Amino acid sequence: MSGTSLDGIDAALTDFSRSPMLIGTAFTAFDNTRRADLLALNAPGENELHRAAVLANQLTCSYAEIVNQLLTQTEIVPSQILGIGCHGQTVRHCPQDGYSIQLVNSSLLAELTGITVISDFRNRDIAAGGQGAPLVPAFHQAVFSHPHTHRLIINIGGIANITSLPPKSDVTGFDCGPGNMLMDAWCHQHTGVAYDHNGNWAKSGNIIPHLLEKLLTSPYITQTPPKSTGRELFHLDWLATLLSGSERPEDVQATLLSFTVEAMKHAIMTWYPCAEELYLCGGGAHNTALIMMLRETIPHHKIELTDALGIPIDWVEACAFAWLAQRTIEGLPGNLPAVTGASGARILGTIHHA
């Protein structure tokens, strides 16, 4: 899995023969050049089709390297692996126009690893009228549901998405709004550091009330689900239209942190006010300032990490795409129409045999 945070590649070797069991994990970071090249493809540019194809091949070589690294460290051979679920790197997510683009050369990945590859998980759902996102709620339902307790799962990646797991009704979920995306971009622009460790820079600033109000007036925040979003909406050029230019950078960072939390709060209190437990995962769950603010903002909810449910926060999404790959191979649907808005359950992904 490599997500909108653009930090790198997560690989999780997962056994689903009983309950999900992590056999091993690996991570490789993107360097600044790789991150910049991927970010540039999120907007129109010169010769972008060629650049995208070349970068897809480069990414695929990195995917193959981390797969081989993971197999070596776990002493497992390719013939023991049923399949690789590879999401690819999203560079455009435009369900309103009928497509979502993730960079990966799945045929090359199958060649390099000798393992069957399952990819392109989003477009089958989009073809059925859905958003193609979020897809992880089906996995959350399979592994995190409780028979008597209404749980919420919030994955805080570049985008934050919420899953509602009520004990006696349909699972629902949607993208709440930005997770780390705006904070990371602003932090990198002003400090040269990829992200704000523990939210320390944000804590050094003060929230700008009128800016927070402007951010929260984004129509996306109050839009009725199903819905999904990405860099197409929440990016630094959009943020710049809301700034006067006289703000202290650390105050903007504090405000962006509050925006992420307030968007989550709005989603919870508008759609799931009776939920009892909230579990966080994704890179943003490492941000102690964010978690502290979330606990202060919605004090009546129990807020924990998914580690308490058996899967550490950094590996939930990688495990989810392994699970979706398993569903594809077994001919089982992987989407939840109540989440994505698709006209029905669909088998997701394309299979590239080794």
Image (cartoon, helix red, strand yellow):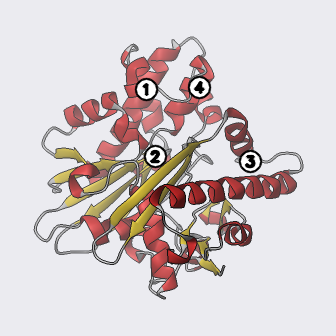
Contact flag, marks 3 and 4 (Cβ < 8 Å): no
Q: Residue 343: percent from the left, percent from the top?
A: 48, 82
Name the kind of residue labelled 3 in the image.
Leu
Q: Earlier in the sequence, mark 1 or mark 3?
A: 3
Name the kind of residue labelled 4 in the image.
His
Q: Secondary structure at mark 1?
A: helix
Judge from the rendering whether residue 20 lies leftward or rightward of residue 8; answer left or right. left
Judge from the rendering whether residue 344 lies leftward or rightward of residue 313; answer left or right. right
Q: Which residue is mark 3?
A: 41
Q: Is residue 341 visible?
A: no
Q: Secondary structure at mark 3?
A: loop
Q: Tell me which residue sits at (56%, 29%) in the image.
A: 194
Q: Which residue is mark 4?
A: 188
Q: Secondary structure at mark 2?
A: loop
In the picture as drawn, the residue positioned furthest to the right comes out as 47
Q: CA distance from mark 4 to mark 2?
A: 16 Å
| Rendered position, 250 above or below 221 | above
Q: Which residue is mark 1?
A: 197
Q: Tell me which residue sits at (42%, 37%) in the image.
A: 216
Q: Which residue is mark 2?
A: 157
Q: Earlier in the sequence, mark 4 or mark 2?
A: 2
